[in-house]
Amino acid sequence: MNAYELVAAAVERLRDADAPTEVRIAVLRGALGRRKLRPAGEVWRLGALCLAPDGALFATGDVLVVTEPTHPNYRNELAVERNELRALLRRGGVPVGAIAVMDARPLDLDAPEPPLVATEEGLGVLWTTGGASIPFDRYIAERVDLLVG
């Protein structure tokens, strides 16, 4: 089975199992450099990859569980930024409890770039930077099995 057939089979299996999706959020820069968040569709998060119902493949971006923002008392810079993102998501209508995948990057099966890689054996997936790649077919099958349960 080629990579496109594997993706199509994964979509069909996830759809048939009614596997839970997460909201993909595009992070845009508005006037004066302000961040704007725009829902950009639903995806199934498969570790380093996300798969859309139409078969589009993405590199997973930052993942946030949407909660009500907390009081902005002193915390580290990353915690403050994530709190601000949660506030933007809530203002954008994303419900509490939803999982948002921020700025997932589109991938092309014909021109792989990390986390997709071309290997001597075919297409692979890098789970971690600098790590060994996992064959694409095995990676997709394992991650779909985990999500379907």
Image: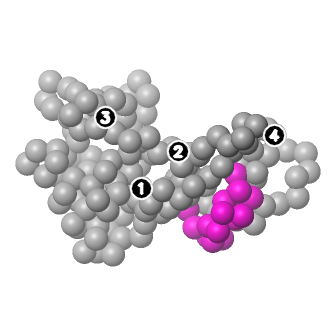
Mark 4 or mark 2, which has the lower sequence index?
4
- Colour scheme in the image? one colour
Nearer to us: label 4 or label 2: 2
In the rendered image, the quadrant that contains the C terminus is bottom left
**Relative to 56, residue 18 above or below:** below
Label 2 Cα crowd, 10 Å radius (few <14 / some 14-19 / many 20+): many
Mark 4 or mark 1, which has the lower sequence index?
1
**Image position, residue 115 (x, y; %):** 37, 34
Q: Amino acid at mark 3?
A: Leu
Disc 3, SS:
strand
Q: Please give the residue where the numbered disc 2 appears in the rendered image.
A: 103
Disc 1, SS:
strand
| In this rendering, position of residue 140 left or right of residue 76 | left
Q: Residue at x 23, y 59 (%)?
A: 10
Disc 2, SS:
loop
**Relative to 35, residue 123 above or below:** above
Q: Amino acid at mark 1?
A: Arg
Q: Please give the residue where the numbered disc 3 appears in the rendered image.
A: 116
- The answer to which image quadrant residue 35 occupies is top right
Q: Residue at x 26, y 51 (%)?
A: 140
Most distant residue in the right direction: 73
Most distant residue in the left direction: 1
Q: Amino acid at mark 2?
A: Asp
Read off the magenta span: 85-99
